[in-house]
Image: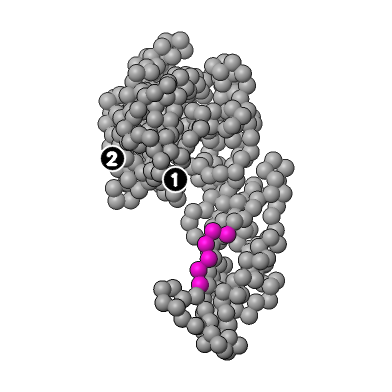
Amino acid sequence: MTEELLSKLDLAYTRRLLEDMIRIDSIVGNEGELADYLKNEVEALGLKGELDLVEPGRSNIYARLAGNKPGKRLNFNGHMDTVPVVDGWDTDPFTPVIKDGKIFGLGACDMKAGIACSLNMLRAFIESNYSFNGELSFSGVIDEEAYGKGAKAMLLTDYAKVDAIVIPEPYPGDGVKPIPLGITGKILYDIIVKGKAAHGFRPHLGLNAIEELGIILANLHKLDFKNHPDFGRGNYSTLKIEGGYKDVYSVVVPASARMEVNRLLVPGETVETAIEDMERLVESLDLTAEVEVKIKPPQYEAFVLDRDEPIIRIFDTIYRQIMGHPPLYEYTSGITDANIFSGEANIPCLHLGPPQEVAHQKNEFVLLDELLPLSQMFTLIASKFLGDLK
């Protein structure tokens, strides 16, 4: 039965989908056309495609395949958006080019190849009339490369009421990109200092907000970063500082200043504890100025997966079967939509996708030879997860 299911996988179909998607500009904020394309594709498979309008011109796309009996629910989730085009491409980023066994194009690796393999898997289930329990679904979401608005919108739908999600991000389980068993979270501090304006030749009559802000900046290393046995300690990076005159030179003591500070969170730290930590630091400095500690998007919770989660156990066995060696795992820093699905909703997420060599860089590509084994692993993971887990 499984052999017939695998026999329905179609590399030509996968390749056609990937080439079509590369031709569609879906740079973050511009996902509407790709959502329409994917709706047509899932409907061509006989499924009902559901568009979920998240923002004007930006929709998620969902589709589901019901099994023979009630059971577990498994979703394959891909983000439709890509990063903007960087300088230096040798070819048109929106024209798929095949050379040396690779398909070049923006989003080829991150993550249109994963979406194509997911639909190839769905097609195989439908074409083979494969018998399974529960529900197999697909979701294409917007905005992963920005604020995660698509994943957050999906959490409000029935499509998030699943037992596990497979995310085809480019994590092939090799030494370069091991499979994440957990990912850090993050917070973006927005720290505002309010001083008092005065003539720059008489600074004692005012209160310099920039200088007060500088005291906070010089003491950020005193934040209480927790140690985690797998992740180690979080970190921080000051991303932006504003204050003083803007366009026209002015000898005025700055009455306000602000800075944005990125902080990685390890499990055990939350957005709330990170805010409290910064407020404690500011209070300890006995500043004269008024300081407001706020946050701004994006923000994400950290998460850790149990190695005994069914989706992880099943994946591990199938990876060894298809790839001929065990996968590598790690606890990593970074952000994916799993920070929303797992970090906020406690849905176990498996990352599995093609090797990543040039994602977010010029001349992005995916290896043609990676499409079939990835489709095979998706198919076997789904069939096992939705079948007998004993």
Q: Which residue is mark 1?
A: 145
Q: Residues within 10 Å of mark 2 (few under 14, many from 20)?
A: some
Give me the residue at 47% from left, 37% from top: 359
Q: Position of residue 63 (x, y in %)?
A: 35, 32
Give me the residue at 49% from left, 42% from top: 337
> Where's the C terminus, which quadrant?
top right
**Element at badge 1?**
loop
What is the number of the mark on residue 300?
Answer: none
Asked if residue 169 lies in the magenta stretch, the reply is no
What residue type is disc 2 on?
Glu
- Quick check: marks 1 and 2 in contact, CB under 8 Å? no
Q: Which residue is mark 2?
A: 33
Query: Colour mode?
Result: one colour
Read off the magenta span. Answer: 238-243
* Residue 265 seen: yes
User: Which of the 4 quarters of the picture holds residue 193?
Assistant: bottom right
373 or 66, nearer to the observer: 373
Q: Position of residue 222 (x, y in %)?
A: 70, 62
Task: Give the vertical position of 380 relative to 34 (above or below).
Answer: above
User: Which of the 4 quarters of the picture holds residue 332?
Assistant: top right
> Where's the N terminus, which quadrant?
top left
**Element at badge 2?**
helix
Q: Residues within 10 Å of mark 1 (few under 14, many from 20)?
A: some
366 or 235, nearer to the observer: 366
